Image: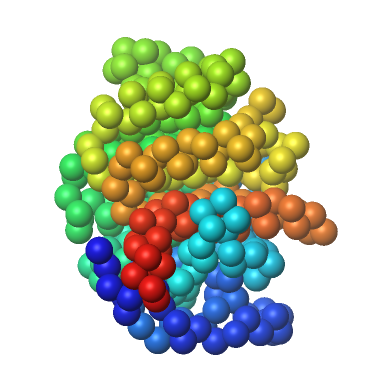
Amino acid sequence: MVGCGSAFLSGYSVRSMTQPDGELPSFLEFEAPAGEPAVAVLPVPYERTTSWGRGTGNGPTALLRASRYVELYDEELRLEPFRIGIETLPPVDVEAVEDVALERISAAARAALERDRFLAALGGEHTVTPALVRGVVDVAGSDLGVVQFDAHADLRPTYAGTRWNHACAMSRVLDLGVPTLAIGIRSLSRPEAVRIETEGLPVIWAGQMEALADEELRTLFPGLLASLPDTVYLTFDLDFFDPSLLPATGTPEPGGGSWRQALALLRLLFEHKRVIAMDVVELAPIPGNPASDFTAAKLLYKCIGYRYRRELNGARGAGC
Ligand SMILES: [Mn+2]
């Protein structure tokens, strides 16, 4: 049980709703809390290799701007997840050559983990994931699994002349010796399909997700999760969602998951595993269409709630 002091922070400034233009707002529009925050939100505006729609470099700003409108009370969990303490870090400076930029991303992940924070990184293109996972492995060790929500397998060995392309993200994760579980996949090349088959990589396909009754999915998913280590990194590529729900991604694909499906799976993930870090990637904001930005912000807030529901309930039970 975590004591009131650390698990139930007070002392946040009131949301101002007056963020000056051009300045990167903090998540939920809060100043850093006075106590030790549990969560570190890390903007990573890295964009080099987006294939089609560009704009993922603006993803963190759009998500943070939209987050000011997220209701602080979670009606499902019946608590206020922000009270666990959420700090928004300065964005990683990605204006450098590829290797240097990626190493800065790894270093930022290491720093957050070393301070015992739950890392929530905001992309940026999916290439940021292996860099973040590398930083997490440096601190937490390689007894780690990665759970990937995504439309794409991202298992190409190289693409468009670089190993550090968004289409190779999960190949680079597997290079680290970290096992993966992919959910929502509905777009991949033949060699990627062959690799999944020959290496027996666990996948819940988008079609499967739709065809299975909720109850069956609730058995299948924890069964596959059981093959991963207890400690998990979550990468959520927003193109997991159907584009009718979330159109603002670099590479939208029809036939994606719904909001309810995503929440049901995330709830199970956070119940079954110790998730120590996550990212939300590939938001490519569409000007004048804020629904995607808001959905991404709310998704992150839901994950923070699922991650800390026990501690927050404990704090409430202790009369804080
Ligand atoms: Mn994708």
Q: Say which residue appears at 51% left-offset and 54% top-offset.
A: 77
Task: State the image quarter where residue 5 is shown.
Answer: bottom left
The correct choice, above or below, for 59 with respect to 165 in the image is below
The image quadrant where one finds the N terminus is bottom left
- Left/right of residue 239 with respect to residue 141 in the rendered view: right
Residue 261 in view of the camera: yes
Query: Horizontal and vertical percent for residue 144?
Result: 24, 43
Query: Horizontal and vertical percent for residue 188?
Result: 52, 23
Query: Horizontal and vertical percent for residue 209?
Result: 55, 22
Q: Say which residue appears at 67% left-offset and 56% top-offset.
A: 293
The correct choice, above or below, for 234 with respect to 3 in the image is above
Residue 240 in view of the camera: no
- Left/right of residue 143 with respect to residue 267 in the rendered view: left
- Left/right of residue 160 with respect to residue 228 in the rendered view: right
Task: State the image quarter where residue 136 is shown.
Answer: bottom left
Q: Say which residue appears at 28% left-offset and 57% top-offset.
A: 135
Query: Horizontal and vertical percent for residue 318?
Result: 34, 70
The correct choice, above or below, for 247 with respect to 1 in the image is above
Q: Say which residue appears at 32% left-offset and 66% top-offset.
A: 117
The image quadrant where one finds the C terminus is bottom left
Question: How is colour applied across the structure in the image?
Answer: rainbow
- Left/right of residue 279 with respect to residue 140 in the rendered view: right
